[in-house]
Amino acid sequence: MQLPKPSREAAVERPAITNVLQAGAELGFVSREATTRRKPGPRRIEAQDKITVTGPKRVIDRLKAYSDAMGGVSYCEAIDALLNAVEAKGK
């Protein structure tokens, strides 16, 4: 097996990196370099857990609407308010 013979043609010059970055920005490409980090969220005063809920869209939409009606509270806060209301009603 023989290796291919090197070409005598002139190598194509590569454009400067600044020209490439400028052309990319003009075309709408977004840099993948690390951005500034956000400040950490509030300190948690109690242990945290997570659930994923799948259910009928109408039920999930009701929870979202209830959360919005309460001033845009988190879903966890909305669920807590609903559970507190049920417990208060049961007493």
Image (tube, grey):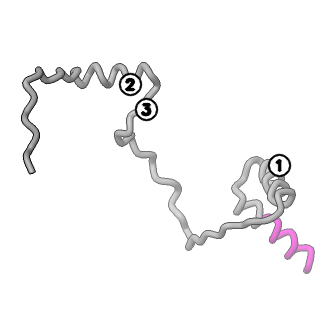
Instruction: Confirm or deny contact between disc 1 and disc 2 (CB under 8 A).
Output: no
Q: Which of the numbered marks, if any, corresponds to residue 12?
A: none
Quarter of the figure that contains the C terminus:
bottom right
Instruction: Give the residue drawn at x 13%, y 23%.
Output: 11
Provide the residue designation for mark 1: 69
Residue 47 higher or lower than 15, as above or below: below
Residue 4 higher or lower than 24, as above or below: below
Which amino acid is tagged 1?
Ala
Which amino acid is tagged 3?
Val
Provide the residue designation for mark 2: 24
SS for dot 1 = helix
Q: How far apart are marks 2 and 3 (CA)?
A: 8 Å
88 drawn magenta: yes
Q: Distance between the residues labelled 3 and 1?
A: 37 Å
- Quarter residue 88 falls in: bottom right
Q: Distance between the residues labelled 1 and 2?
A: 44 Å
| Label 3 neighbour load within 10 Å: few <14, some 14-19, many 20+ | few
Q: Where is residue 49 in the image (x, y as percent from the top left)?
A: 59, 72
- Quarter residue 90 falls in: bottom right
Instruction: Give the residue drawn at x 78%, y 48%.
Output: 68
Which amino acid is tagged 2?
Gly
Q: Where is residue 56 in the image (x, y as percent from the top left)?
A: 83, 62
The secondary structure making up most of the magenta span is helix
- Quarter residue 46 falls in: bottom right
Q: What stretch is highlighted in magenta?
A: 80-90
